Amino acid sequence: MKIYPLKDGDFSVDKNKNFTYLEDTGNDKNLKIAVQPFLIETAGNLVLLDAGLGWMENGIPKIHTNIIKAGFQPEDVKLAMLSHLHKDHINGLVNRAKNDWTLNFPNAEVYIQKREYDFALSKDGSPSFDLDALKFIVENANIIWMDSDKGSIISEIDFEVTGGHTPYHQVFWIKDNGETAFYGADNLPQMGYLNYQIAFKTDYDGKKAMEERIIWKKRAKEGQWKILLYHDIEIKIITLYDK
């Protein structure tokens, strides 16, 4: 298994969910996070875990540039797994360089929890969601609707609906050649979430997310998982070991 972080950048995020590059903000008091989807190459698949902000550089989607640097083409991505539908996790599926939008990954099957989609549609006006982008994805991509609480997508990928950050937020395990990569998305977005047992008020159910992290930390040590951290500025991937 090979894992490639596809970092959009480090951002300052204000209360209206506006993202600005840290280098352009100075020392403001807003939330500071990275945005970094992950590309995983297994023996049989090229898998995208969430898709980032849809950031553009020099007229090219940043996520395309990162994938090409990793040695692939956007058309090579066959599976795209969405943990939830906040705009900083889905907008990288859409190329808005021109008025005529296109899909960044036209050959990919896009896996979405149907219940999370229904929840997103109920949040019209929320700055966390970009419903125009979401509706474009649903209308144009090859959507695989998910409605189970847990299971296997293919032999290499397991999922579980955990709730926590959003009502039907889901996490993924990718297993290949004796290795396990774990993607907890926004229920485990930064290393600090493992170090401190905190129920975050910004989550839909912070207590549930906190309880899940305690379980994952124990299992991660036992199984030596590679933990993928979507929003950590300093750490991209970490493996925990029992002392």
Image (tube, rainbow, N blue to C red):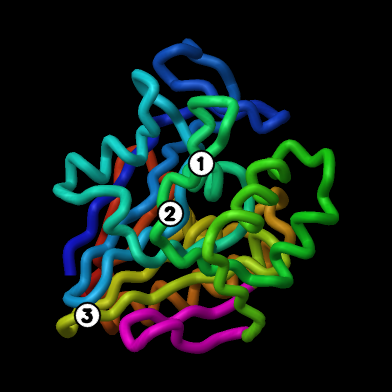
Give the residue number, with chain letter if any, for mark 1. 102
Residue 69: x percent and y percent?
18, 40
| Residue 191 visible here | no
Whether residue 146 is situated above or below residue 101 in the rendered picture: below
Which residue is farthest front? 100
Residue 58: x percent and y percent?
35, 19
Front position in the image: 93 or 243? 93
Image mark for residue 81:
none
Give the residue number, with chain letter if any, for mark 3. 176
Residue 110 belongs to the span the image colors magenta: no
Q: Nearer the viewer, mark 3 or mark 1?
A: 1
The reply to whether discs 2 and 1 touch (Cβ–Cβ < 8 Å) is yes
The reply to whether discs 3 and 1 touch (Cβ–Cβ < 8 Å) is no
The residue depicted at 45 percent of the width and 31 percent of the height is 55
Q: In which quadrant will I find the C terminus? A: bottom left
Point out the stretch of residues depicted in magenta: 149-162
Q: Work out how far the residue at label 2 is from the one at label 3, CA to CA, in angstroms.
A: 25 Å
Q: In which quadrant will I find the N terminus? A: bottom left
Whether residue 143 is situated above or below residue 43 in the rendered picture: above
Front position in the image: 175 or 91? 91
Residue 229: x percent and y percent?
38, 54
Front position in the image: 168 or 73? 73
Give the residue number, with chain letter if any, for mark 2. 106
The residue depicted at 28 percent of the width and 80 percent of the height is 175
| Residue 126 visible here | yes
Q: Secondary structure beneath disc 1?
A: strand
Whether residue 22 is situated above or below residue 44 in the rendered picture: above
Q: Work out how far the residue at label 3 is from the one at label 1, CA to CA, in angstroms.
A: 32 Å
Q: Secondary structure beneath disc 3?
A: strand
Q: Amino acid at mark 3?
A: Asp
For residue 14, what is the image quadrant?
A: top right
